[in-house]
């Protein structure tokens, strides 16, 4: 007899772990299948020499503090894991270098502080910026209302409480910032954070951007004391503690159907587990094209998947430096290195393999104990779009090309900031789309899910959620899902998938 | 606050409905062709980092009285068409079923990466070790056409251009010559751009592995130099005694990276000698597949191993690792490096106490009692949960 579960979660990434924990808390019998040997997916760490590197997290948004909690804090509180975790506040909102103009801007957290600093850089920007934050807060609240009341949206309530939100709901970032008469330069500085959406401000949805920037500036961002592995492991522990099961080194080979209904999964080792409810923490592309017989995939699901654009591919450099950050002159937490503050131009740069724009973070400046005394952990993130990276590599030149890209990024960082780091490299690890394809199985090693653009921005995804539940009792979560990629989005998407699955289970009960 | 948003079309709740319709239209207009799944990055990931490579033994050469070289080729019938590329200095972990035990052993690839790409072969050289179950099996029993599974190339013991000095001083003891053979071959093949001086310590001239080939390589290419240091024999033109600072000094340039590979005895000796240079840690890289074996205890403990679907009771001596005990008992426990570095054997200690050495556990793993069984010696009865 094969073991039977109420729900099987494929993939123990951020979203998969949250979904599983929420379901075991609702007393469902849950199995999580993870192909790697640690939980967390991207949210992990790895050890090299005397350094434990943070694998993915630059900063966690929507966490905040006990006094000023964000959505992720509230979710963790509901799941009872906050007290097992320890977070540290990052230093500044952004510290951005623009190479074309040789300018450098350092923006603080806190809405008033942010507005005041912007006024120093761009005189007469504060009135418009105040309006931006006012509108951003409304957008955030409106989105929250819509998510909570998806099925019974009260039109009058919406009109009454979120009138401005409705006016900007379909606009992109540039359009709304223009209307608010925010000076161009202030728009560009404010938009520094666009990179994490992987989409330039001309196509990025204003409501999504604004609501996240609002949380980010008002609540700050946090980093766990013992790398993201601490969060992932804590969630995994809690799942097991409450009776859920997590099987590592377990790769799903096929989704099993009976009478066209989900019946279970077959693993690569031949094991079969039965369930009527699946939550997929892997991308629809991977699930449909590798784990399902084609005739069983509804054509609308295929069309939706084909209509989407894959988001940014990641290229990361992890450095263990044998000097303290202070001695090296690395005083900030983050360094956004851009050629231009114009996101459209920078977005074009993501299709140029030679471009060296990147974000660098210095973990020790936030978590003092991140590495041994007198050493520093530095992490560079470089993003590529489309096949920019892939089309340049072969099996034979792969090691050479990745070294070359990394070297150029480090060299240009040194030139831009005047900070010398190369002679102090004690450990180095370079991860490319190939590495990410190996660990996550995402199409082309994408790390940002689908590109948030046009009709695939957050809001259209969210309001179409029910219509796009093409396979009954299969729910997606994670970076490719409605809440887009990033830690905050994926944690919240796991919560959503669990709630939808609980609803599916309930519906099933009433069917019978 | 009053916002002047007049220039936007006066939209209301219809906005949301229109978004939904527009999205439906995008989907409707999209193609229903099969979803693309042959992306370059994914294909290359499979080529470079296969979970498993099925191989066959294609050739066996006796190098010395206790050392043999094995040429590995893909086992096409088992589904492996080509071997993965690697960096000179990396190892593969080989799985062998011997008399009811399931053993994983790391072996450094000693050939050039060019052999993997062009001839589809790896070469490994195995020295027979006293009580070495796998090495004795390979030396005495393995024959041409025997089939095994190996891991993808792994390990960190390779030249890193952005970190290391271009003048590499390789210190090898005995079978520790393997990674440097691969590096030397790669220099000749134009794959590796470094200046390599191999200082090779052995007992007698007879014990030198790859003697002829090493001389050929160093004659062929002036970026490669080999210095033999014989501890138990005096031969003209060979250095005598143990590897010393005086010998090393002759080959130093302004900036040097040391790569040390050999027995634990060699490490202790080199730690002392290289310590005199007072170098930053980055300039000294180590590789060893020999865990510490100097535990003298004679106790034997009960170990309950929980796998994915069953519980197995075995015993483990205080001087053997939990991994060794599991392997001997035929338990398929994941492992690669066997020296507590790679983390592949990461398991949960559910009960009991272990002594762990040279460990590279993640900080959070320590909080939840995770261990690396490849370097964990029992100090009490144990319950361990392995990820398999």
Image (cartoon, grey):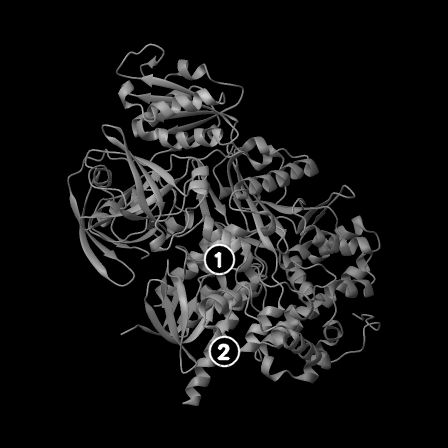
Where residue B342 sits: x, y (%)?
A: 39, 44
Work out whether B111 lies above or below B82: above
Chain under numbered label 1: A
Where residue A351 sits: x, y (%)?
A: 67, 52
Work out whether A125 lies above or below A102: below
Hey, which quadrant is residue B184 in on the image? Answer: top left
- Residue drawn at 31 percent across, 72 percent down: A3
Work out whether B226 lies above or below A245: above
Q: Which of the two residues, A135 or A185, is positioned nearer the viewer here?
A: A185
Work out whether A200 lies above or below A307: above
Q: Which of the two residues, B186 or A462, is positioned nearer the viewer here?
A: B186
Instruction: Find disc 1 in the rendering and name its residue.
Output: A440
The reply to whether dot 2 and dot 1 touch (C-beta < 8 Å) is no
Residue B147 is left or right of residue A424, and the answer is left
Real-space CA distance between mark 2 and mark 1, rounded to the nearest whole angstrom: 23 Å
Tell me the number on the disc at residue A471. Answer: 2
Disc on the earlier residue, 2 or 1: 1
- Decide: few, some or many residues near mark 2? Use Cα within 10 Å; few <14, some 14-19, many ≥20: some
């Amino acid at each position: 007899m094969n073991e039977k579960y109420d729900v099987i979660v494929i993939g123990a990434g951020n979203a998969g772990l949250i979904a599983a924990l929420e379901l075991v808390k609702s007393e469902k019998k849950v199995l999580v299948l993870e192909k790697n040997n640690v939980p967390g997916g991207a949210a992990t760490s790895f050890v090299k020499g005397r350094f434990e590197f943070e694998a993915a997290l630059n900063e966690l948004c929507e966490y905040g503090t006990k006094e000023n909690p964000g959505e992720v804090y509230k979710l963790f509180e509901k799941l009872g894991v906050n007290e097992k975790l320890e977070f540290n506040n990052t230093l500044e909102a952004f510290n951005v270098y623009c190479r074309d103009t040789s300018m450098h801007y350092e923006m603080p957290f806190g809405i008033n502080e942010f507005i005041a600093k912007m006024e120093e850089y761009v005189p007469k920007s504060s009135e418009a910026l105040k309006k931006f934050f006012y509108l951003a807060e409304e957008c955030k609240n409106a989105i929250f209302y819509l998510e909570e009341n998806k099925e019974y949206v009260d039109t009058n309530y919406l009109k009454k409480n979120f009138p401005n939100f409705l006016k900007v709901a379909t606009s992109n970032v540039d359009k709304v910032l223009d209307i608010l008469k925010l000076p161009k330069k202030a728009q560009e500085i404010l938009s520094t954070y666009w990179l994490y959406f992987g989409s330039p401000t001309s196509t990025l949805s204003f409501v999504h951007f604004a609501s996240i920037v609002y949380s980010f500036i008002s609540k700050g961002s946090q980093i766990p004391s013992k790398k993201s592995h601490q969060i992932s492991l804590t969630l995994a522990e809690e799942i097991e503690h409450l009776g859920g099961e997590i099987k590592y080194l377990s790769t799903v080979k096929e989704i099993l159907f009976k009478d066209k209904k989900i019946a279970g999964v077959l693993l690569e080792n031949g094991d079969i587990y039965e369930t009527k409810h699946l939550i997929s923490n892997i991308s629809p592309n991977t699930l449909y094209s590798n784990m399902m017989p084609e005739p069983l995939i509804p054509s609308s699901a295929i069309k939706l998947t084909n209509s989407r654009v894959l988001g940014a591919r990641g290229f990361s450099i992890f450095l263990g430096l044998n000097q303290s950050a202070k001695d090296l002159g690395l005083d900030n937490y983050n360094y956004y290195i851009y050629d231009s503050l114009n996101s459209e131009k920078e977005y074009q740069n993501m299709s140029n393999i030679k471009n060296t724009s990147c974000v660098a973070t210095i973990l020790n400046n936030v978590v003092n104990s991140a590495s041994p005394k007198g050493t520093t952990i530095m992490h560079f993130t470089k993003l590529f779009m489309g096949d920019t990276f892939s089309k340049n590599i072969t099996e034979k030149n792969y090691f050479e090309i990745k070294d070359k890209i990394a070297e150029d990024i480090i060299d240009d960082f040194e030139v831009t900031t005047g900070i010398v780091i190369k002679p102090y490299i004690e450990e180095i690890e370079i991860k490319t789309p190939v590495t990410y394809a190996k660990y996550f199985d995402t199409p082309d090693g994408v790390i940002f899910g689908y590109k948030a653009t046009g009709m695939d921005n957050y809001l259209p995804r969210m309001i179409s959620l029910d219509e796009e539940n093409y396979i009954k009792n299969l729910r997606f979560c994670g970076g490719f899902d409605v809440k887009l990629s990033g830690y905050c989005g994926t944690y919240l998407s796991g919560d959503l998938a669990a709630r939808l699955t609980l609803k599916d289970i309930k519906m099933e009960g009433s069917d019978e | 606050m009053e916002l002047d948003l007049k220039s936007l079309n006066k939209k209301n709740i219809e906005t949301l409905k229109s978004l939904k319709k527009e999205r439906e239209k995008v989907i409707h207009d999209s193609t229903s062709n099969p979803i693309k799944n042959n992306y370059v990055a994914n294909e290359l990931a499979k080529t470079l980092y296969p979970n498993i490579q099925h191989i066959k033994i294609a050739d066996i050469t006796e190098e010395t009285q206790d050392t043999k070289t094995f040429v590995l080729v893909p086992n096409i019938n088992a589904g492996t068409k080509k071997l993965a590329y690697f960096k000179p200095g990396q190892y593969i972990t080989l799985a062998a079923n011997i008399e009811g035990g399931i053993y994983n052993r790391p072996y450094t690839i000693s050939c050039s990466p060019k052999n993997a790409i062009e001839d589809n072969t790896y070469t490994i050289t195995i020295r027979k070790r006293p009580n070495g179950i796998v090495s004795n099996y390979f030396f005495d029993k393995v024959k041409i056409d025997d089939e095994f599974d190996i891991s993808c190339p792994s390990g960190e013991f390779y030249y890193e251009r952005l970190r290391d000095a271009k003048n590499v001083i390789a210190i090898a003891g005995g079978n520790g010559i393997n990674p440097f053979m691969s590096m030397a071959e790669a220099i000749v093949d134009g794959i590796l751009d470094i200046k390599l001086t191999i200082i090779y310590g052995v007992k007698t001239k007879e014990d030198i592995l790859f003697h002829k080939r090493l001389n050929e390589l160093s004659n062929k290419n002036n970026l490669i130099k080999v210095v033999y240091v014989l501890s138990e024999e005096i031969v003209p033109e060979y250095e005598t005694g143990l590897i010393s600072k005086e010998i090393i000094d002759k080959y130093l340039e302004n900036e040097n990276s040391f790569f040390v590979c050999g027995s634990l005895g060699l490490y202790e000796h080199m730690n002392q000698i290289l310590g005199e240079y007072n170098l930053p840690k980055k300039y000294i890289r180590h590789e060893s597949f020999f865990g510490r074996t100097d535990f003298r205890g004679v106790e034997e403990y009960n170990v309950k191993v929980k796998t994915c679907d069953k519980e197995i009771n075995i015993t483990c001596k205080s001087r053997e690792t939990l991994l060794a005990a599991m392997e001997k008992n035929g338990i398929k426990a994941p492992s690669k490096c066997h020296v507590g570095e790679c983390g592949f054997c990461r398991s949960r200690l559910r009960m009991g106490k272990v002594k762990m050495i040279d460990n590279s556990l993640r900080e959070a793993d320590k909080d939840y009692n995770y261990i690396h069984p490849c370097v964990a010696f029992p100090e009490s009865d144990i319950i361990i949960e392995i990820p398999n």
